[in-house]
């Protein structure tokens, strides 16, 4: 049981910034869809401005014919506003790490789990949910430090978990 839990919490890939994600490499690996987190992944926490690097990534992905979907535990209104900018679907609030929204998104994109990569900044929501759903999980560093006390608690847990695993797959 223990090994299974830690396996689920382990991202398949860790990048030092969102623009280090190589869309051509992912495509070569058979990835055709991206499920992307909102807060602290493409927007600073609770803000509605997508950072330039994430904006470039999303537009590039769409141009390369990737399916892209936003899945956020944030409010529906703010997520919808951002999804609309790109004309992409969204699920919010998604109650990650529940598999529900991930499964819905994968079905909506018309892809198999293995063809979908989940990009997010949190182990206990994005990575855990993505791994449980059978997707290729990519952990990005959080954009801002300002966040809920609950999220801060989760980060403390993450640090403990991360320090126990060797990060030889950092890009
Ligand atoms: Mg996040």
Image (cartoon, helix red, strand yellow):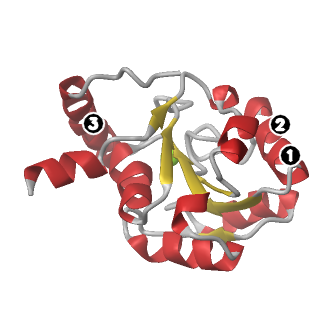
Which residue is at the front of the view, 114 or 167?
114
Residue 124 location, x and y as percent? 33, 50
Q: Is residue 79 left or right of residue 61?
A: left
Upstream in sequence: badge 2 or badge 3: 2
- Residue topped by disc 2: 56
Q: Residues within 10 Å of mark 2 (few under 14, many from 20)?
A: few
Residue picked out by circle 3: 158
Q: Secondary structure at mark 1?
A: helix
Q: Nearer the viewer, residue 12 or 79?
A: 12
The residue drawn where x is 19% and y is 30% is: 160
18 up-or-down from 107: above or below: above
Direction right: furthest residue: 63
Q: Is residue 162 above or below residue 117?
A: above
Tag in front: 1 or 3: 1
Q: Quadrant of residue 131?
A: bottom left
Q: Position of residue 101 (x, y in %)?
A: 51, 73
Marking on residue 59: 1
Please tell me whether mark 3 sits on a helix, a strand or a loop: helix
Identify whether 101 is placed above or below 41.
below
**Figure check: 124 above or below 89:** above
Residue 67, percent across and down? Answer: 75, 62
Classed neighbour count for the residue bearing mark 3: other residues with Cα under 10 Å, few (<14), some (14–19), many (≥20)? some
């Amino acid at each position: 049981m223990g090994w299974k839990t830690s396996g689920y919490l382990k991202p398949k890939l860790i990048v030092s910034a969102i623009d280090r994600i190589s869309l051509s490499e992912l495509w070569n690996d058979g990835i055709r869809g991206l499920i992307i987190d909102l807060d602290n992944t493409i927007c600073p926490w609770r803000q509605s401005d997508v950072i330039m690097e994430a904006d470039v990534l999303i537009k590039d992905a769409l141009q390369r014919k990737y399916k892209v979907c936003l899945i956020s535990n944030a409010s529906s209104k703010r997520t919808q506003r951002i999804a609309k900018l790109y004309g992409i679907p969204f699920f919010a609030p998604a109650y990650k790490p529940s598999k529900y929204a991930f499964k819905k998104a994968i079905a909506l994109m018309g892809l198999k789990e293995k063809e979908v990569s989940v990009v997010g900044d949190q182990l206990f929501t994005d990575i855990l949910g993505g791994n449980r759903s059978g997707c290729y999980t990519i952990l990005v560093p959080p954009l801002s430090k300002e966040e809920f006390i609950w999220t801060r608690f989760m980060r403390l847990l993450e640090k403990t978990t991360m320090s126990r695993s060797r990060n030889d797959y950092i890009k």
